[in-house]
Amino acid sequence: MSQAFIQLAIDCISAEKSLAIVEACKDYVDIIEIGTPCLKVNGASLLEQILAIVGAKPVLVDTKTMDAGFYEVDPFYTLGASICTVLGAAGETTIQGVVSAAQKHGKQSQVDLINCTNKQAIAELACQTGASIIGIHTGIDAQQHGETPFADLQRISSLKLKTMISVAGGINKHTAPRAIELGADIVVVGGAITGADNPRQAARDLYQAIR
Amino acid sequence: MSQAFIQLAIDCISAEKSLAIVEACKDYVDIIEIGTPCLKVNGASLLEQILAIVGAKPVLVDTKTMDAGFYEVDPFYTLGASICTVLGAAGETTIQGVVSAAQKHGKQSQVDLINCTNKQAIAELACQTGASIIGIHTGIDAQQHGETPFADLQRISSLKLKTMISVAGGINKHTAPRAIELGADIVVVGGAITGADNPRQAARDLYQAIR
């Protein structure tokens, strides 16, 4: 099993709880993600607070940008975000805008395939555009219907594109090894850590399961 | 020409500038919209600041929700938002979540058809789900390619659904009357007001053009 990065998705709303989880888990994860609901409630100030805790560790801001690509993410790169995300559903111009903003700052961009009907075409477009990461993502609402990201992960991974692949959607210490075997370069874990009685222990368990 | 509501879209990033524009223009608009880039940078505190200025005037928070429908918008309704938006591209479960959150609070929900390929089907789904408003929306990035919302507006309006119709995408005092003739119940104006040398004058001009 090859090495993969662990991304901790902060999926709560409370800034105080978010910061406590980051502080508790930072030693066992490689990337901190500010989840979309958390971002919209707390704004960019939470990014600054998290950067103050994690120092040089990369922070992904899950902007899920749908329009005004460059304009929307540029402020986050300016503040120190390492990765912003754009929806595959947004279309080419918006994807290009986010990629351009990332490149301007020497940072990375991620195209999120959540709910895209034409995932392969969007993944190939993302790669051509210069995106750094393709996100295979089964959303929280889709997980309610029993959906998982594994089939999409296998399909997109088999394309052997030159972008990294991130996988998100109910990943835990039991399923992360399989995600990595199927080609994930980054495994995103949210509720399995943030919803645990002891988030630090849960992050360490995940770390030990795949390192 | 029937009466339509005027929605002012705050499309800047600066909270200070946003609040100044709201203060200057509030007498001539019916709904204040916190635009998506502005929301992501400033968070929910800007909603509270705007509500303190506009009192009972409705505020739309352009969440453009793509996942975790209920969870993401519930905090904004709790704080006093009158309308939150969900992407048509998000799919049925997420749309239902946003509609449910609105109904829980006795407020309204809007389904944004931006970049949907199957706009008619999504509009009908939105209506069945109980959404209050369908948003016909040509994004800022699509406007760069000369796209306008008028053809979609005409098509969706002709369906005679029982939701209201909002139209956004480069609308100004010259095009607002046409949008209303084509069936818009709400005309959304951003840059034509926020980018004007005198936003208050621009808002008054728009008001006089359609009232």
Image (spheres, coloured by chain):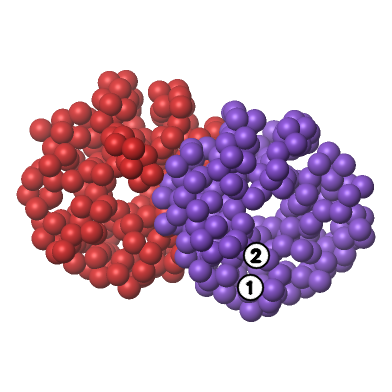
Chain colours: A red, B purple
* Residue situated furthest bottom in the rendering: B52
The secondary structure type at the circle numbered 1 is helix
Q: Could you tell me the amino acid type at mark 2?
A: Val
Where residue B51 appears, x then y in whole percent?
63, 74
Where residue B58 appears, x then y in whole percent?
68, 66
Q: Which mark is residue B50?
A: 1
The secondary structure type at the circle numbered 2 is strand
| Image quadrant where residue B54 sits | bottom right
Contact? badges 1 and 2 (CB < 8 Å): yes
| Image quadrant where residue A37 sits | bottom left
Q: Which is nearer the N-term, disc 1 or disc 2?
A: 1
Crowd class of label 1 (few under 14; some 14 to 19; many from 20; radius 10 Å): many
Q: Are marks 1 and 2 on the same chain?
A: yes
Vertical order, B135 against B42 (above or below):
above
Vertical order, B107 against B174 (above or below):
below
Q: CA distance from mark 1 to mark 2?
A: 8 Å
Q: Could you tell me the amino acid type at mark 1?
A: Ile
| Image quadrant where residue A53 sits | bottom left
Where residue B207 appears, x then y in whole percent?
87, 60
Q: Which mark is residue B59?
A: 2
Chain holding disc 1: B
Front tag of 1 and 2: 2
- Judge left or right: residue A103 versus residue A147: right
- Judge left or right: residue A157 versus residue A119: left
